[in-house]
Amino acid sequence: MAYNIAIASGKGGTGKTTVAVGIYQLLLNKYNYTVQLVDCDVEEPNDVIFFEGIDKVWQEDAVQMIPTINTDNCDFCRKCADYCEYNAITLIPSTQFAEINTSLCHSCGACLVACSNNAIGEAPHKIGEIAQFKGHNGELVQEGKLKVGSPMQTLLIKQLKKSVLLNSEINIYDAPPGTSCSVVESTIDADYVLLVTEPTPFGLHDLKLAVNLMDDLKKDFGVIINKAGLGSDNIYQFIRDNNVDLVGEIPFSKSMASYYAVGDLSNKWPIHVEQSINNIAEKLHSKVTLHERNYHT
Ligand code: SF4
Ligand code: SF4
């Protein structure tokens, strides 16, 4: 039974990808787990950029089934439009026009149930792509990429999660930034969630939202403060006041920022950054060990 770790952040730019890739490499190479990295940041997936010598081994379209109206069978009774909670159906009887707005439709199926004239069918509509990448040293990355303009992040993440291979010991879900439905979908199955933040007023504001979300979801979670040493101490006060588990701090490093800018996080971490990520990976290793022990007893 895989141990599922989600890595989330209330806001973008906190270094979530750095943490996800860093932890992934250590759990794979130092602790010898079979680990799958699942890039759920579907609007802007970029985890795979930070792996050297990794190849795409398959890709498939992610589709949403969208209803279609056959106007030959339609008597424009409007029952389907009345059932549609998302105002996705336009009917103009005078011109015999019937259309489903693919951006608004949530594929709930209510209109299909509503229509008694057999006028509604379904057709696949592409919302993005799901791909799998494999590296020469056992690296395995699944990635969802949303079609530009599609609002179906959550549906794509659902489909991405279904494509995750079942034989890994650990799955790491790199969630999108924020606290929206797509973050809920990326973290909902996690045994443990790491919230990556930074010691700035923006970081604190969004961390509060993320902590509230984790409490609502009743998730076991901890916080990593990235770019530690910058900004103020207010975030530490919040963590203390709310008994939040501080899993680790990654010191701010200018050279780290330059490596990130050229897509290279593999082997050139400054020693103090490497030590911090090592400490975090070690804590996760303890959690995975405990999970495995509980599973087998
Ligand atoms: S419920 Fe069926 S028949 Fe009525 S307007 Fe909708 S598609 Fe047409
Ligand atoms: S499937 Fe649901 S959301 Fe889509 S058009 Fe039909 S009723 Fe509306």
Image (cartoon, rainbow, N blue to C red):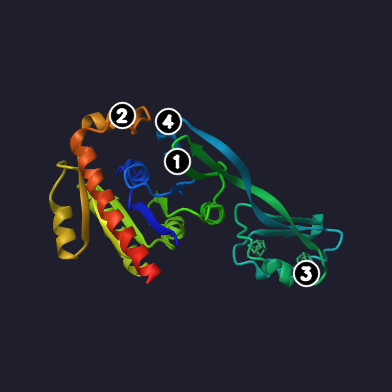
First in sequence: mark 2 or mark 1?
1
First in sequence: mark 1 or mark 4?
4
Q: Within 8 Å: ligand 2 and the Cβ of disc 1?
A: no
Q: Residue at x 69, y 66 (%)?
A: 81
Pointers 3 and 4 in contact (C-beta within 8 Å): no
Mark 3 or 4, which is nearer the eye?
4
**Mark 1 to mark 4: distance in Å?**
10 Å
Q: Is residue 138 visible?
A: yes
Residue highlighted by disc 1? 139
**Mark 2 to mark 3: distance in Å?**
61 Å
State the image coordinates of residue 197 (x, y, percent, origin top left). 26, 49
Q: How many marks?
A: 4
Pointers 1 and 3 in contact (C-beta within 8 Å): no
**Mark 2 to mark 1: distance in Å?**
20 Å
First in sequence: mark 4 or mark 2?
4
Q: Amino acid at mark 4?
A: Glu
Name the quadrant where ligand 1 sits: bottom right
Q: Residue at x 68, y 56 (%)?
A: 65
Residue highlighted by disc 3? 77
Residue highlighted by disc 2? 259
First in sequence: mark 1 or mark 3?
3
- Kind of element beneath mark 4: loop
Q: Amino acid at mark 3?
A: Cys
Residue highlighted by disc 4? 52
Q: Within 8 Å: ligand 1 and the Cβ of disc 3?
A: yes
- Kind of element beneath mark 1: loop
State the image coordinates of residue 75 (x, y, percent, origin top left). 83, 66
Q: Nearer the viewer, residue 206 or 47?
A: 47
